[in-house]
Protein backbone atom coordinates (compact mmCIF):
# COMPACT_ATOMS: atom_id res chain seq x y z
CA UNK A 1 0.00 0.00 0.00
CA UNK A 2 2.82 2.38 0.92
CA UNK A 3 4.66 1.74 -2.38
CA UNK A 4 1.46 2.36 -4.36
CA UNK A 5 0.87 5.58 -2.43
CA UNK A 6 4.39 6.80 -3.18
CA UNK A 7 4.03 5.98 -6.86
CA UNK A 8 0.86 8.07 -6.93
CA UNK A 9 2.78 10.88 -5.20
CA UNK A 10 5.56 10.68 -7.78
CA UNK A 11 3.01 10.70 -10.60
CA UNK A 12 1.30 13.74 -9.04
CA UNK A 13 4.55 15.73 -8.89
CA UNK A 14 5.49 14.73 -12.45
CA UNK A 15 2.08 15.87 -13.77
CA UNK A 16 2.26 19.05 -11.68
CA UNK A 17 5.73 19.82 -12.99
CA UNK A 18 4.67 19.25 -16.59
CA UNK A 19 1.61 21.49 -16.13
CA UNK A 20 3.66 24.27 -14.55
CA UNK A 21 6.31 24.09 -17.27
CA UNK A 22 3.60 24.12 -19.95
CA UNK A 23 1.96 27.12 -18.30
CA UNK A 24 5.28 28.95 -18.09
CA UNK A 25 6.02 28.21 -21.76
CA UNK A 26 2.54 29.41 -22.77
CA UNK A 27 2.94 32.63 -20.79
CA UNK A 28 6.39 33.13 -22.25
CA UNK A 29 5.20 32.68 -25.84
CA UNK A 30 2.17 34.92 -25.24
CA UNK A 31 4.32 37.60 -23.66
CA UNK A 32 6.76 37.48 -26.58
CA UNK A 33 3.91 37.84 -29.07
CA UNK A 34 2.50 40.84 -27.20
CA UNK A 35 5.85 42.55 -26.65
CA UNK A 36 7.94 41.53 -29.66
CA UNK A 37 8.76 45.17 -30.40
CA UNK A 38 10.17 45.91 -26.97
CA UNK A 39 13.69 44.48 -27.29
CA UNK A 40 14.95 44.91 -23.72
CA UNK A 41 11.73 43.76 -22.13
CA UNK A 42 11.65 40.84 -24.52
CA UNK A 43 15.14 39.76 -23.51
CA UNK A 44 14.42 40.10 -19.79
CA UNK A 45 11.16 38.24 -20.18
CA UNK A 46 12.84 35.33 -21.95
CA UNK A 47 15.50 35.11 -19.22
CA UNK A 48 12.89 35.36 -16.47
CA UNK A 49 10.65 32.65 -17.84
CA UNK A 50 13.62 30.41 -18.66
CA UNK A 51 14.69 30.69 -15.02
CA UNK A 52 11.17 29.77 -13.89
CA UNK A 53 11.09 26.73 -16.15
CA UNK A 54 14.53 25.59 -14.98
CA UNK A 55 13.53 26.05 -11.34
CA UNK A 56 10.36 24.04 -11.80
CA UNK A 57 12.25 21.21 -13.50
CA UNK A 58 14.91 21.11 -10.79
CA UNK A 59 12.33 21.26 -8.01
CA UNK A 60 10.27 18.44 -9.50
CA UNK A 61 13.37 16.32 -10.02
CA UNK A 62 14.49 16.94 -6.44
CA UNK A 63 11.10 15.95 -5.02
CA UNK A 64 10.98 12.75 -7.05
CA UNK A 65 14.53 11.83 -6.02
CA UNK A 66 13.72 12.43 -2.35
CA UNK A 67 10.58 10.29 -2.56
CA UNK A 68 12.55 7.44 -4.14
CA UNK A 69 15.31 7.78 -1.56
CA UNK A 70 12.79 7.60 1.27
CA UNK A 71 11.26 4.52 -0.33
CA UNK A 72 14.68 2.85 -0.56
CA UNK A 73 15.45 3.89 3.02
CA UNK A 74 12.23 2.30 4.28
CA UNK A 75 13.02 -0.87 2.32
CA UNK A 76 16.45 -0.91 3.94
CA UNK A 77 14.97 -0.48 7.43
CA UNK A 78 12.54 -3.33 6.78
CA UNK A 79 15.32 -5.57 5.46
CA UNK A 80 17.66 -4.84 8.37
CA UNK A 81 14.82 -5.34 10.86
CA UNK A 82 14.11 -8.73 9.33
CA UNK A 83 17.80 -9.65 9.22
CA UNK A 84 18.14 -8.81 12.92
CA UNK A 85 14.81 -10.06 14.19
CA UNK A 86 14.82 -13.48 12.52
CA UNK A 87 18.07 -14.86 14.02
CA UNK A 88 17.31 -13.30 17.42
CA UNK A 89 13.92 -15.04 17.47
CA UNK A 90 15.56 -18.29 16.40
CA UNK A 91 18.26 -18.09 19.11
CA UNK A 92 15.63 -17.32 21.75
CA UNK A 93 13.57 -20.33 20.67
CA UNK A 94 16.55 -22.69 20.93
CA UNK A 95 17.55 -21.31 24.35
CA UNK A 96 14.00 -21.66 25.69
CA UNK A 97 13.90 -25.24 24.43
CA UNK A 98 17.20 -26.04 26.16
CA UNK A 99 15.97 -24.38 29.35
CA UNK A 100 12.56 -26.06 29.57
CA UNK A 101 13.23 -29.53 28.17
CA UNK A 102 15.69 -32.31 28.59
CA UNK A 103 17.50 -32.59 25.28
CA UNK A 104 19.91 -35.36 24.33
CA UNK A 105 23.50 -34.49 23.48
CA UNK A 106 23.09 -34.88 19.71
CA UNK A 107 20.14 -32.49 19.63
CA UNK A 108 21.93 -30.13 21.99
CA UNK A 109 24.96 -29.92 19.70
CA UNK A 110 22.64 -29.31 16.74
CA UNK A 111 21.02 -26.42 18.60
CA UNK A 112 24.45 -24.98 19.41
CA UNK A 113 25.49 -25.18 15.78
CA UNK A 114 22.30 -23.47 14.57
CA UNK A 115 22.64 -20.72 17.16
CA UNK A 116 26.23 -20.08 16.07
CA UNK A 117 25.04 -19.78 12.47
CA UNK A 118 22.38 -17.28 13.55
CA UNK A 119 25.03 -15.30 15.44
CA UNK A 120 27.21 -15.25 12.32
CA UNK A 121 24.23 -13.93 10.37
CA UNK A 122 23.72 -11.18 12.93
CA UNK A 123 27.39 -10.25 12.83
CA UNK A 124 27.41 -10.09 9.03
CA UNK A 125 24.38 -7.79 9.01
CA UNK A 126 25.93 -5.46 11.59
CA UNK A 127 29.25 -5.44 9.72
CA UNK A 128 27.48 -4.58 6.46
CA UNK A 129 25.71 -1.63 8.07
CA UNK A 130 28.93 -0.40 9.69
CA UNK A 131 30.88 -0.76 6.45
CA UNK A 132 28.17 1.14 4.59
CA UNK A 133 28.40 3.93 7.14
CA UNK A 134 32.18 4.13 6.68
CA UNK A 135 31.81 3.99 2.90
CA UNK A 136 29.53 7.04 2.96
CA UNK A 137 32.55 9.17 3.89
CA UNK A 138 35.28 9.63 1.33
CA UNK A 139 38.53 8.52 2.85
CA UNK A 140 41.81 6.90 1.92
CA UNK A 141 42.44 3.25 2.83
CA UNK A 142 43.48 2.90 6.48
CA UNK A 143 46.68 1.05 5.71
CA UNK A 144 48.34 0.86 2.33
CA UNK A 145 50.33 -2.33 1.95
CA UNK A 146 51.22 -4.52 -0.97
CA UNK A 147 48.57 -7.21 -1.27
CA UNK A 148 48.74 -10.43 -3.27
CA UNK A 149 45.29 -10.01 -4.76
CA UNK A 150 45.14 -13.50 -6.30
CA UNK A 151 45.82 -15.14 -2.94
CA UNK A 152 43.23 -12.91 -1.29
CA UNK A 153 40.62 -13.93 -3.89
CA UNK A 154 41.33 -17.62 -3.32
CA UNK A 155 41.01 -17.18 0.43
CA UNK A 156 37.64 -15.47 -0.03
CA UNK A 157 36.46 -18.32 -2.24
CA UNK A 158 37.37 -20.90 0.41
CA UNK A 159 35.58 -18.86 3.07
CA UNK A 160 32.49 -18.51 0.85
CA UNK A 161 32.37 -22.27 0.31
CA UNK A 162 32.52 -22.85 4.06
CA UNK A 163 29.99 -20.15 4.92
CA UNK A 164 27.42 -21.25 2.33
CA UNK A 165 28.13 -25.01 2.66
CA UNK A 166 29.11 -25.35 -0.99
CA UNK A 167 31.17 -27.94 -2.78
CA UNK A 168 34.54 -26.75 -4.14
CA UNK A 169 33.35 -27.32 -7.72
CA UNK A 170 30.71 -24.59 -7.23
CA UNK A 171 33.47 -22.15 -8.16
CA UNK A 172 35.46 -22.20 -11.39
CA UNK A 173 38.65 -20.28 -10.81
CA UNK A 174 40.81 -19.03 -13.66
CA UNK A 175 44.01 -17.10 -13.24
CA UNK A 176 45.81 -15.32 -16.05
CA UNK A 177 49.46 -15.71 -16.78
CA UNK A 178 52.15 -14.09 -14.69
CA UNK A 179 50.50 -15.09 -11.42
CA UNK A 180 53.19 -13.40 -9.37
CA UNK A 181 52.14 -10.03 -10.77
CA UNK A 182 48.70 -9.74 -9.11
CA UNK A 183 49.86 -7.16 -6.60
CA UNK A 184 47.85 -4.13 -5.52
CA UNK A 185 48.41 -1.40 -2.96
CA UNK A 186 45.63 -1.01 -0.42
CA UNK A 187 43.90 -2.09 2.76
CA UNK A 188 43.74 -5.92 2.89
CA UNK A 189 40.62 -5.93 5.09
CA UNK A 190 38.69 -3.60 2.78
CA UNK A 191 39.72 -5.57 -0.30
CA UNK A 192 38.68 -8.80 1.41
CA UNK A 193 35.29 -7.25 2.18
CA UNK A 194 34.82 -6.19 -1.46
CA UNK A 195 35.69 -9.60 -2.90
CA UNK A 196 33.58 -11.43 -0.31
CA UNK A 197 30.58 -9.24 -1.12
CA UNK A 198 30.94 -10.00 -4.84
CA UNK A 199 31.13 -13.75 -4.18
CA UNK A 200 28.23 -13.72 -1.69
CA UNK A 201 26.09 -11.74 -4.13
CA UNK A 202 26.83 -14.19 -6.95
CA UNK A 203 25.98 -17.15 -4.73
CA UNK A 204 22.74 -15.68 -3.39
CA UNK A 205 21.38 -14.85 -6.84
CA UNK A 206 22.43 -18.12 -8.48
CA UNK A 207 19.32 -19.87 -7.24
CA UNK A 208 19.38 -23.53 -6.26
CA UNK A 209 22.34 -24.37 -8.52
CA UNK A 210 25.45 -22.39 -7.70
CA UNK A 211 27.86 -22.18 -10.63
CA UNK A 212 30.13 -19.17 -10.28
CA UNK A 213 33.11 -18.32 -12.47
CA UNK A 214 35.92 -16.30 -10.91
CA UNK A 215 38.55 -14.91 -13.24
CA UNK A 216 41.53 -12.72 -12.40
CA UNK A 217 43.83 -11.30 -15.06
CA UNK A 218 46.23 -8.51 -16.02
CA UNK A 219 44.83 -6.78 -19.14
CA UNK A 220 47.78 -4.36 -19.13
CA UNK A 221 50.64 -3.16 -16.95
CA UNK A 222 48.44 -0.82 -14.90
CA UNK A 223 45.40 -2.87 -13.93
CA UNK A 224 44.39 -6.01 -12.07
CA UNK A 225 40.90 -7.19 -13.07
CA UNK A 226 38.60 -9.55 -11.18
CA UNK A 227 35.46 -10.88 -12.89
CA UNK A 228 32.79 -12.75 -10.94
CA UNK A 229 30.09 -14.33 -13.09
CA UNK A 230 27.00 -16.19 -11.96
CA UNK A 231 24.39 -17.94 -14.07
CA UNK A 232 21.44 -16.85 -12.02
CA UNK A 233 18.55 -14.44 -12.27
CA UNK A 234 20.40 -11.64 -14.11
CA UNK A 235 19.79 -7.88 -14.05
CA UNK A 236 17.71 -5.75 -16.47
CA UNK A 237 19.81 -3.31 -18.52
CA UNK A 238 18.32 -0.19 -16.90
CA UNK A 239 19.31 -1.44 -13.43
CA UNK A 240 22.96 -2.26 -14.12
CA UNK A 241 24.17 1.04 -12.67
CA UNK A 242 21.51 1.40 -10.00
CA UNK A 243 22.53 -1.80 -8.21
CA UNK A 244 25.60 0.04 -6.86
CA UNK A 245 23.49 2.66 -5.13
CA UNK A 246 22.94 2.49 -1.40
CA UNK A 247 19.83 0.52 -0.34
CA UNK A 248 18.92 -0.33 -3.95
CA UNK A 249 17.57 -3.77 -4.77
CA UNK A 250 16.29 -4.68 -8.21
CA UNK A 251 12.47 -5.01 -8.10
CA UNK A 252 11.44 -8.57 -8.83
CA UNK A 253 15.02 -9.82 -8.94
CA UNK A 254 15.17 -11.08 -5.37
CA UNK A 255 14.53 -14.78 -4.97
CA UNK A 256 12.10 -15.73 -2.17
CA UNK A 257 14.91 -17.14 -0.02
CA UNK A 258 17.29 -14.23 -0.62
CA UNK A 259 17.39 -11.57 2.05
CA UNK A 260 19.63 -8.55 2.14
CA UNK A 261 20.09 -4.89 2.95
CA UNK A 262 20.95 -3.52 -0.50
CA UNK A 263 24.39 -2.48 0.74
CA UNK A 264 26.74 -5.14 -0.65
CA UNK A 265 27.52 -3.66 -4.07
CA UNK A 266 27.41 -0.13 -2.68
CA UNK A 267 30.25 -1.10 -0.33
CA UNK A 268 32.17 -2.72 -3.20
CA UNK A 269 31.93 0.46 -5.26
CA UNK A 270 33.06 2.63 -2.33
CA UNK A 271 36.09 0.39 -1.65
CA UNK A 272 37.00 0.30 -5.34
CA UNK A 273 36.95 4.11 -5.51
CA UNK A 274 39.03 4.40 -2.33
CA UNK A 275 41.70 2.30 -4.02
CA UNK A 276 41.59 4.23 -7.29
CA UNK A 277 39.65 1.54 -9.14
CA UNK A 278 36.13 0.96 -10.38
CA UNK A 279 33.43 -1.69 -10.51
CA UNK A 280 30.65 -2.32 -13.02
CA UNK A 281 28.06 -4.98 -13.85
CA UNK A 282 27.10 -6.64 -17.12
CA UNK A 283 24.11 -8.85 -17.87
CA UNK A 284 22.22 -10.00 -20.93
CA UNK A 285 18.99 -9.60 -19.01
CA UNK A 286 16.79 -11.47 -16.58
CA UNK A 287 17.56 -15.16 -16.40
CA UNK A 288 20.95 -14.86 -18.12
CA UNK A 289 23.24 -14.33 -15.15
CA UNK A 290 25.42 -11.39 -14.19
CA UNK A 291 29.11 -10.54 -14.47
CA UNK A 292 30.56 -8.02 -12.03
CA UNK A 293 34.02 -6.66 -12.84
CA UNK A 294 36.33 -5.11 -10.26
CA UNK A 295 39.34 -3.19 -11.60
CA UNK A 296 42.18 -2.06 -9.33
CA UNK A 297 45.47 -0.27 -10.03
CA UNK A 298 48.37 -2.68 -10.18
CA UNK A 299 51.15 -2.15 -7.66
CA UNK A 300 54.08 -0.23 -9.09
CA UNK A 301 56.44 -2.68 -7.45
Image (cartoon, rainbow, N blue to C red):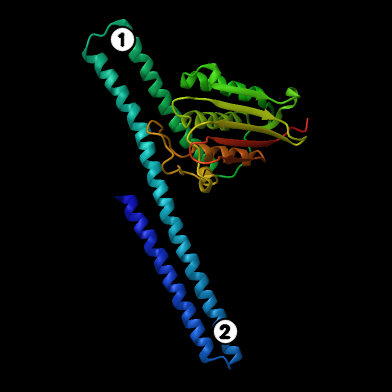
Q: Is residue 203 left or right of residue 144?
A: left
Indicate which disc, 2 or 1, sits on the residue closer to the N terminus. Answer: 2
Which residue sits at x=40%, y=28%? Answer: 122
Q: Quadrant of residue 180?
A: top right
Residue 56 point in image, percent of width and height: 47, 70
Residue 144 seen: no
Please identify the quarter of the rendering in which residue 278 is found: top right
Q: Nearer the viewer, residue 182 or 271?
A: 182
Q: Is residue 232 left or right of residue 119?
A: right
User: Is residue 96 visible to the viewer in this orientation of the structure?
Assistant: yes
Q: Quadrant of the C terminus?
A: top right
- Which residue is denoted by mark 2 in the rendering? 44
Query: Where is residue 113, by image quadrant?
Result: top left
Report helix, strand or loop for mark 1.
helix
The spot of residue 298 in percent (x, y) is 73, 33
Q: Nearer the viewer, residue 15 or 41?
A: 15
Residue at the spot 55% in from the left edge and 32% down from the top edge: 198
Residue 231: % across, % down: 52, 31
Q: Residue 22 at what x, y percent from top left?
A: 45, 75
Can you name the residue that lies furthest to the bottom here?
A: 37
Q: Residues within 10 Å of mark 2 (few under 14, many from 20)?
A: few
Residue sitting at 52 percent across and 23 percent down?
Answer: 160
- Tag 2's secondary structure? helix
Badge 1: few (under 14), some or many (20 or more) residues near its Cα, within 10 Å? few
Determine which of the numbered discs, if any, sits on residue 107 in the image: 1
- The total number of labels drawn is 2
Numbered label attached to residue 250: none
Marks 2/1: CA–CA distance:
83 Å
Amino acid sequence: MRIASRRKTIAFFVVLGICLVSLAVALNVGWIILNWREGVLLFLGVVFFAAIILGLILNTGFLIREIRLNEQHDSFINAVTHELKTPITSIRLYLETLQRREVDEVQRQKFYRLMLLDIDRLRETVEQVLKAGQASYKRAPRERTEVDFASLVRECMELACTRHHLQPDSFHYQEGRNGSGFKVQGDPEDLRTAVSNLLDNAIKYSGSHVDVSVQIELPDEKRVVLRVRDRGVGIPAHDLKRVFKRFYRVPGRSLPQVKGTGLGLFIVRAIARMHGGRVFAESEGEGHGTTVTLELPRSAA
